[in-house]
Amino acid sequence: MAQSVKKRELDKIDQNIISILQGAARITNLQLADKVGLSPSSCLARVRKLEEDGCLGPYQASINLDRLCRSITCIAMITLENHRQQDFRVFENFVEALPEVVQCDTVSGGCDFILRVVCADMERYHVVNEMLLNSGANVVNIKTHVVMTENKKFSGFPLDELLG
């Protein structure tokens, strides 16, 4: 379930640092400092503080799977029989250990979880699907949608709109 997290106040320079790093995480500290109008040491100190506070990181590369291998992406909508905290935790812990589940969100509405599952092929997805059904969390329904085309890839959060 969602936890309440203390929000960190960001000034305009911190917002700019996060926006720039979101689009170009490999930028050098010198380039970043120049773009936000700080000395390199002040810029690095701010980046380190943003990392310590959990506002930045972990850093990871964006991978183009189409260039590396064949894969199938499925969106699985999961419904549990009960809404007991224990069942939710069992399911959350179970999917955390499945490498094919690349994203898991607890949601409101017609289902309890929405998973993004990436597998080598449909045969492997069927195996993962069976594992989800037998997770011990009393899964009663899985509705699967196969992604045909990813029309808009995640490219970062709209920070200007969210932070005002």
Image (tube, rainbow, N blue to C red):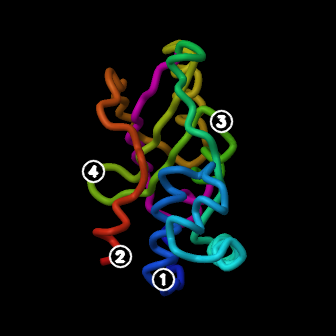
The CA distance from mark 4 to mark 2 is 30 Å
Looking at the image, tell me whether mark 2 or mark 3 is earlier in sequence order: 3
Give the class, few, some or many, for how many residues have Cα within 10 Å of label 1's Cα (few <14, many ≥20).
few
Q: Nearer the viewer, mark 2 or mark 3?
A: 2
Q: Which residue is mark 1?
A: 10
Mark earlier in primary sequence (1, 2): 1
Residue nearest the observer in this picture, 103 or 152: 152
Left of 133 or right of it: where is 59?
A: right
Q: Position of residue 110 (x, y in %)?
A: 27, 50
Amino acid marked by disc 3: Pro
Compare residues 29 and 141 and report the one nearer the observer.
Answer: 29
Q: CA distance from mark 4 to mark 3?
A: 25 Å
Q: CA distance from mark 1 to mark 2?
A: 9 Å
Looking at the rendered structure, the kind of residue marked 2 is Leu
At x 66%, y 55%, the residue is 28
The amino acid beneath tag 1 is: Leu
Relative to 67, say whether 12 is above or below.
below
Decide: few, some or many residues near mark 4? Use Cα within 10 Å; few <14, some 14-19, many ≥20: few
Q: Is residue 28 above or below residue 128?
A: below
Label number found at residue 110: 4
Nearer the observer, disc 4 or disc 2? Answer: 2
Indicate whether residue 79 is drawn in magenta.
Answer: yes
Report the number of numbered marks: 4
Disc 4 to disc 1, C-alpha distance: 36 Å
Q: Nearer the viewer, mark 4 or mark 1?
A: 1
Q: Earlier in the sequence, mark 4 or mark 1?
A: 1
Kind of residue sitting beneath label 4:
Gly
Residue under label 3: 99
